[in-house]
Amino acid sequence: MMKSFSQRFLHNPLVIVGLSWLTLVLLVAVLADVLAPANPFAIVGKPFLPPAGDFLLGTDSLGRDVLGGLIHGARTTLLIAVLSTLAAVAFGALVGAVAGYYGRWIDDVLMRLTEFFQTIPSFLFALVLIAILSPSAMNLVIAIATVSWPPIARVVRGEVLSVKSREFVRAAIVAGQRDSAILISQVLPNTLSPLIVTGSLLVATAILVESALSFLGLGAPNQMSWGFMIGAGRSFMREAWWLVTVPGIVILLTVLSINLVGEGLNDALNPRLADA
Amino acid sequence: MLIIRRLAAVSAGLLAAAVLASAPASAQKPGGTLVQITQPEPPNLAPYISTSGPIGQVTAKVFDGLLEYGFDLKPVPSLAESFEVTPDGKTITFKLRQNAKFHDGKPFTSADVRFTFMDVLKKVHPRGIATFRELTAVETPDPYTAIFKLEKAAPYMLMAFSGYESPVLPQHVYGSGDIKTHANANIPVGTGPFRFVEWRRGEFVRLDKNKDYWRAGLPYLDRIVVRFIGDSSTRTAALEKGEAHVAGFGAIPYNDVKKLAALPSVEVTTKGYEMVSPIVELLLNTKHAPLDNQKVRQALAYAIDRQFVIDNVWFGYGKPAAGPISSNFAPSGMFEAGKDYNAADRVARANALLDEAGFPKKADGFRFELVHDLTPYGEEWQRFGEAVQQQLAQVGVKVTLRYEDVAKWLKRVYTDYDYDISSNFLYNLADPVLGVHRSFHSDRIRPGTVFVNGARWSSPETDKIMDQATVEPDPAKRGALYRELIKQTSEASPVIYVLELQFPTLVNKQFKNVITSPLGIYGNYATAYRE
């Protein structure tokens, strides 16, 4: 007998672990100004104070509070990751849906375009975009979205191809619905489950790309982020281990949690795969 | 015509040479290979056409200059045994050494001097074009006399005769063909203590002892190998293991310097940059409100905690700057501390000035907002920007940081002037005419030319002082003019002087006498030896 979606999803212990961590991170991000009211860039103490002294996680090379940085970094990192993923999903879904639904030359043009983007290594592409656009939060969202929409477009196109020949779509055509209405109300809802899974995993990739860009000094210069903290601390790995270790672990846990939740979603939305 | 003999300076140099020669022979035995790390690899070995830093680190060993300089920036003899300047400063007569030979065996004569300065340096050397602007002719009455004729007095020119800045070239080698694309651009031939042997791209340049060097018994070393190692941690490891012996000019990251300095085998010195004298500064756009207000500019200068920046951004390698001219110029009388922006009550003063200027703190605690364009040269500049941002926040100035690539940043600051504050570091070089005037003189407001007067500061008073100092042959009067310039510019504060940057040079203790001049690793290592 088939269990319901929520049963399958929430009874997976790995999903619970992932969800708990993500909830914590989300709460911290939302309540950042309450939990750490000071500006995360403020110089609050002596540089290189080790953890568990005056500051729970120590201070960095300029004397900034590492814990405060982590709290405010959660907000920046999540915001950039989620926004860029939403943009990528919206654009990718549009391209994939149009290509799959109309087929023929439109499909050819859009898919060649998608492949063109796919052939450029995504991180290097993001690096070039940021170098051209100059680093800021908005430009990071644009760059990450630009390099991450092609897989979404391909997934959606595949789904649309299989859905569009079904009877209910034909019925809608016969009933005289407009193409856009058919796409939005009939076709896209049926591509949702792979879209959600791919999209949730994209958030993890976006966090990694944002962190890597910040690590290279190309992050948003006025927003504290986890990658920025690692980038600023990497020169002091020998003298001050906590500067890279702490944000590194936080990034690891967050990306892992998103993957666990994503896998869980996949299993729950495709029960035949999970039960097999 | 009355002639001032500059024998004081020259004989001091000869004395130094004599002291060196009379030191116990056992301490300075010949032999040994010194490995220098130069970063990055030079694009070519043609110092007469490019001032790219790494080139000189190699070629200063191959080419001699007419003069060299002591740590007090006074000239000492080299290819010129002595020189005389007329009181009007318009004629400089060099007596040349008679026993110097180029590495191909041909003798060095005054014809080579004329060729070098008139046909090459004055025409194609990036700095030489300006330095030798007033030079109209080099007369060669005999093979060992070269007379420089000047349109106007140019006292700063006397600082530009080192083998690094003005390498003397053999006319019979470089005289034929186009100097800009010369076949010997990567096969340098000079009179220096070391002759060029081989350049293996991406790996090293090998220089061997010049056995016919005009200074008898020198050089001591058999060979210099200049290695190019792209990865900074590998460079550090090479010094740590003793595989390489000398590195300077930022080749070793500051935090690794600290680690290497703790080793018994490595010595760290900050000497050898006295003719470079980099000063870290904040450039203010004096045409942008509110930075067009002198009180605001002074307040910002007071707000910067210089010692914090030195200790935490540059790892202690610097000292607070006291004005536009480096304290390295103190021996020549051209230095004096300007307005003391480092005063103990500087934050209170800054706040008071901003209140006076009509920018009270608003409800959010800020008076006004500025954008700070970061120098895109690496992480210390980013840290510097973040520190400045916090320090200005303390006096109620909200700063947003902007980070762009080098080309965009240069265009924004020096072409479009579309900025509020930008950081930078400019070299004072060997004389204020060469390194300081460019920041203030109104004739250096040149859109599109980088590292000039980006603040667009302009005042008839300061222009006049600089014009006078440019042609004033009397060192005492020149010194007085520059001290007045320091006073006026630090009062007007178009540029905030933060620190005199000190580059650490690391030398393996087996080797002695490596850093012997204000040009440091741009020196020729003739007297360096291995213990």
Image: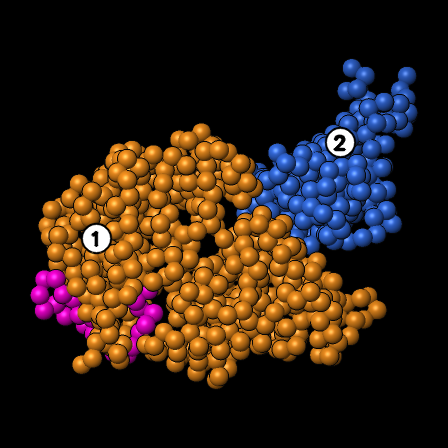
Chain colours: A blue, B orange
What separation in Å lies between label 1 and label 2 (alpha carbons)? 60 Å
Q: Nearer the viewer, residue B336 or B453?
A: B336
Residue highlighted by disc 2? A253
Label 1: chain letter: B
Q: Is residue A171 above or below residue B501?
A: above
* Other residues around mark 1 within 10 Å, as few (<14) / some (14–19) / many (≥20): some
- Quarter of the image for the C terminus of chain A: give it: top right
Q: Position of residue A207 (x, y in %)?
A: 70, 39
Q: Is residue B143 magenta?
A: yes
Could you say whether the residue bearing mark 2 is in a helix, strand or loop?
helix
Judge whether residue B204 can be spotted in this image.
Answer: no
Q: On the image, numbered disc 1 is attached to which residue? A: B182
Residue B315 in percent (x, y) is at 58, 47
Residue B259 seen in the current view: yes
Specify whether B519 is left or right of B306. Answer: left
Residue at 34 percent of width and 62 percent of height: B74
In the image, the segment drawn in magenta is B137-162
Amino acid type shown at disc 1: His
- In terms of depth relative to the viewer, which is nearer, A89 or B380? B380
- Residue furthest bottom in the image: B460
Identify the element where label 1 is drawn: loop
Q: Kindly identify the amino acid type of the residue bearing the numbered disc 2.
A: Leu
